Amino acid sequence: MNKVWLIIQREFLTRVRKKSFLITTIIVPLIIPVIIGGLVFIMLKEAESAKPDTVMVVDESGKFDLDSTKNTKRFHFIPLQVPLEQAKKAYNETKDFALLYVPEFDINKPEGLTIYTQENPSIEKIGDLESILADRVRDLKLQEFKIDKEVLQNLKTNINLKQINLTETGEEKTSNALILNGIGFVLGILIYIFVLVYGIQIMQGVIDEKTSKVVEVIVSSVKPFQLMLGKIIGIAGVGVLQFLIWIVLTTFLSSGVLGYFGLKTPQKQAMEQVEKKVKDEDVKKAMSQASPQINEIMKSINEIPFTKIAFVFIFYFLGGYLLYGALFAAVGSAVESMQESQQFQFPITMPLLVGYLGLFMFILRDPHGPVSFWLSIIPFTAPVAMVGRIAFDVPLWQLALSMTLLIGGFLLTTWIAGRIYRVGILMTGTKVNWRVLAKWFMLRE
């Protein structure tokens, strides 16, 4: 066991002392808030200084009311009392954004409306124009059916269901599906990325040692299985340390550093811009009405068991990493370059990919459904699936069963990988395929 510990120390310290580790672990989390803040600031400034796009309009229907649309912040409409072909020639001689053609149309089935542009416009601008036209057609329908706009507006009612979970003891806890979805989404993606990245690091490290012949010296004093186990655990320690540092820097230090240099976080910048723009009494009234909803959201956030979620995340990060790390180590011992490893990488990572896709297709849509349950129980998909479900208050028996099976899965993959590793790590010049790996697995010690 002492030899395994020495290998763990070697793998851990070798990577932690690298400049690349210091850069990615310490500097990157500090740079990201600055970049985001800068981009948000530029976006808001650009929106403030942006001039409305000019749109020429040929309205053959006579139904497009320029008086109600020409003063929008996004578009400035100019009517043309000429035929369409002549309007096209006039438009091409300008640098205006677009030429809008409105033919005679049936308000119940508006067709034929066309926009001519000199460049490919963004989907946002096209959507804004379509919204303006849709509002105008809606107004025409209201006039035809003699429906008052204010009456119609008063008929609209927004319903916000207050979500409360009842525990077995009768305790009530506030919940919010949107927040829980966001937590599951972020945690699932992080697990997928971390397991994949650090698993490939293990494989790369094994390949480097094998090709440099360093491993021949190491295995003279330790067993191949001890070498593999030490390498996996050592790199896992690097991953956990890096992740913890990222959490600390992102949540505490980044805001402090930005404040020290007189900069503001993107959230503060956005809020200040909103406060400057909120002068309309209707908007203020709407915000005051929304305050109870904001209070409900904050209450829902306070009810989320972040300590439990953090513990589960670290457990499944380590469990998933150890499970897949053993397989990556086995592949690294069998091949002599990253190119040769490509034929083995996809079959290994395919279950992890299934869990990743299942996160979006099943878990976030129905976290307590049968497919979500099985994805979070099967060891190869559980690391992504269970962290995606954990915010939705997974029953303890399901969590315990999943954790137990994940530990069993890690022991199984480590045993399988160890049998391949003990042979492959000393093999060179052999063309490796799945049949060769199976042969190495069956060899007796």
Image: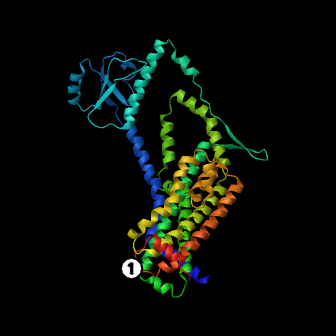
Where does the image place residue 407, in percent across and percent down from the top left?
Answer: 64, 66
Question: Is residue 443 depicted above or below 353 in this figure?
Answer: below
The amino acid type of the residue labelled 1 equals Gly
Question: Is residue 333 depicted above or below 175 in this figure?
Answer: below
Quadrant where the C terminus is found in the figure: bottom right
Residue position for label 1: 429
* Residue 122 appears left or right of 12: left
Where does the image place residue 129, in percent across and percent down from the top left?
Answer: 38, 29
Snapshot quadrant of residue 248: bottom right
Where does the image place residue 175, in percent across and percent down from the top left?
Answer: 66, 43
Q: Can residue 322 be seen in this view?
A: yes
At 69% from the left edge and 43% from the top edge, which residue is drawn? 174
* Residue 242 appears left or right of 302: left
At 39% from the left edge and 23% from the top edge, which residue is drawn? 69
* Residue 336 appears left or right of 160: left
Where does the image place residue 336, in percent across and percent down from the top left?
Answer: 40, 75
Snapshot quadrant of residue 342: bottom left
**Along the viewing direction, whichever of 285 and 11 lies nearer the viewer:** 11
Q: Tag 1's secondary structure?
A: loop
Q: Can residue 73 be seen in this view?
A: no
Question: Is residue 249 depicted above or below 45 in this figure?
Answer: below
**Along the viewing direction, whichever of 376 and 387 lies nearer the viewer:** 376
> How busy is the neighbourhood of tag 1: few (under 14 within 10 Å), some, or many (20 plus)?
few
Snapshot quadrant of residue 293: top right
Looking at the image, the residue that sits furthest to the right is 169
At 48% from the left edge and 36% from the top edge, which residue is drawn? 276
**Along the viewing direction, whichever of 404 and 307 lies nearer the viewer:** 404
At 76% from the left edge and 45% from the top edge, which residue is drawn? 171
